[in-house]
Amino acid sequence: MLKKSKKNYSKINVWDYLENYHKNKKIILDIVDKVFKSGNLILSKEVQSFENNFSKFTGNSFGIGVNSGTDALQIALMSIGIKRGDEIITVSNTAVPTVSAIISCNAIPIFVDINENDFLINADLIEEKVNKKTKAIIPVNLYGQSANYEKIIKISKKYNLKIIEDCAQSTGALYKGSPSGSFGNLSAFSFYPTKNLGGFGDGGMIVTKNVKLYEKCKKLRKYGMSKLYYSEIHGINSRLDEIQAAILNYKLSKLKSCIIRRRYIAEIYRQNIKNKDLILPSENVDNYHAYYVYVVRHPKREKIMKYLQNNKIFCNISYPFPIHSMKAYKNLNRKKNNLKTTNKVSKEIFSLPMYPELSMEKLDKIINTINKF
Ligand SMILES: Cc1ncc(COP(=O)(O)O)c(C=O)c1O
């Protein structure tokens, strides 16, 4: 049992990169200094080294560093030739970029409902959405847990569909013992500062085992060029900075222990939260959950979040609005969508503070406060 908290804490954020920065300040600033002095700032040695290390880490052969997770998704879609009118199966319970990347390719997102227990794509509902226009599936490994790839891969083979894993939230997770990002034809990662592997700015990467897709993604991130000032295909500008790559390379070496710490915090929550109305996250048997966020569910979400906030504990909701409910994407809200579970859970889910540097004292305070609600 945790003891009653006596200390008076300042606010507890849902995530906090500053604690990590203060811990590693000297190392980070030395890395930045080294890059500045190198004379190379974009797509050079540090990026290549990080592409090698990260692609290996995810069980792939090639990595293409880009400007963000959003760009990683868009370039992955472009590389498999997605064009106007193609349909891409995904979920509405996700971050906007999963869907905006599809729309940037003039393709149509087709939403499948989610499972009630893990909030991930319900693989049993995918097949009924497949038709002649369907070209790919983007399973989103949301909150740090992989989707059901055993079923998804079977469907993709049956209908000759490509899989692009959205791994923005699942860096460091495993599915049946293999790394998240090792199941798709291509997989897209984000290094946004809050992520399990977060930089000090934007960043992303596409990983793949396929050399042709690798070559194509490399061109696509740089105006469609492989030789200077000559575009072979239409591409975009999406490059990873040397500073980000160098810092991420260092942070990658610490990632496994950071995930262990996240899992430890999740276990402390699981063992000590005693609020019968608060549903804690479930970890599927095939999964090693990387706990990017710790998503709980409560029928009186607004009330409990307000109460926690009054006690200086700040939570977050990922996500309060399913994509199909937003003004920008209203046209995707087709009646046949039937997203009952997505709609229902979006009104009840919220995330408790979760980051590796979260101290036992802060955890203690969060748990004791929740237990008094
Ligand atoms: C599920 C998901 N997909 C894609 C992205 C896009 O990543 P980025 O913010 O690096 O563009 C994010 C980031 O928020 C995400 O959570």
Image: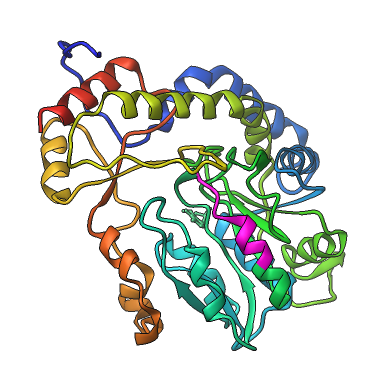
Decide if residue 232 is on the left or right side of residue 319.
right
Q: Is residue 103 above or below residue 18?
A: below
Residue at 63% over, 46% down: 180
Quadrant of the image containing the N terminus: top left
Q: Does 149 appear in magenta?
A: yes
Residue 310 image offset from top left, x and y in percent: 10, 35
Q: Say whether residue 228 is visible.
A: no
Q: Quadrant of residue 164?
A: bottom right
Q: Is residue 92 above or below residue 190?
A: below
* Image position of 137 with respect to 57: above or below: below
Q: Is 66 one of the magenta-colored residues?
A: no
Residue drawn at x 69%, y 58% as measured from the top left: 184
Give percent across and percent down for residue 361: 28, 15
In depth, the one of 340 and 364 nearer the eye is 340
Front position in the image: 57 or 218: 57
Q: Is residue 318 above or below residue 360?
A: below
Question: Split into 4 quadrants, where in the image is the C terminus?
Answer: top left
The quadrant in which residue 34 appears is top right
Instruction: Residue at 84%, 62% (x, y): give it.
Output: 215
**Region in magenta:** 145-154
Q: Quick one: which residue is furthest to the right in this view?
A: 227
Q: Quadrant of residue 30?
A: top right
Compared across the picture, whether 248 is left or right of 110 comes to right
Note whether residue 238 is visible: yes
In the image, what residue occupies the spot 24% across and 37% down?
314
Find residue 81 and report its horizontal and vertical position in percent: 73, 78
Main SS of residues in magenta: helix
Asked if residue 116 lies left or right of residue 314, the reply is: right
Q: Position of residue 302 (x, y in %)?
A: 14, 50
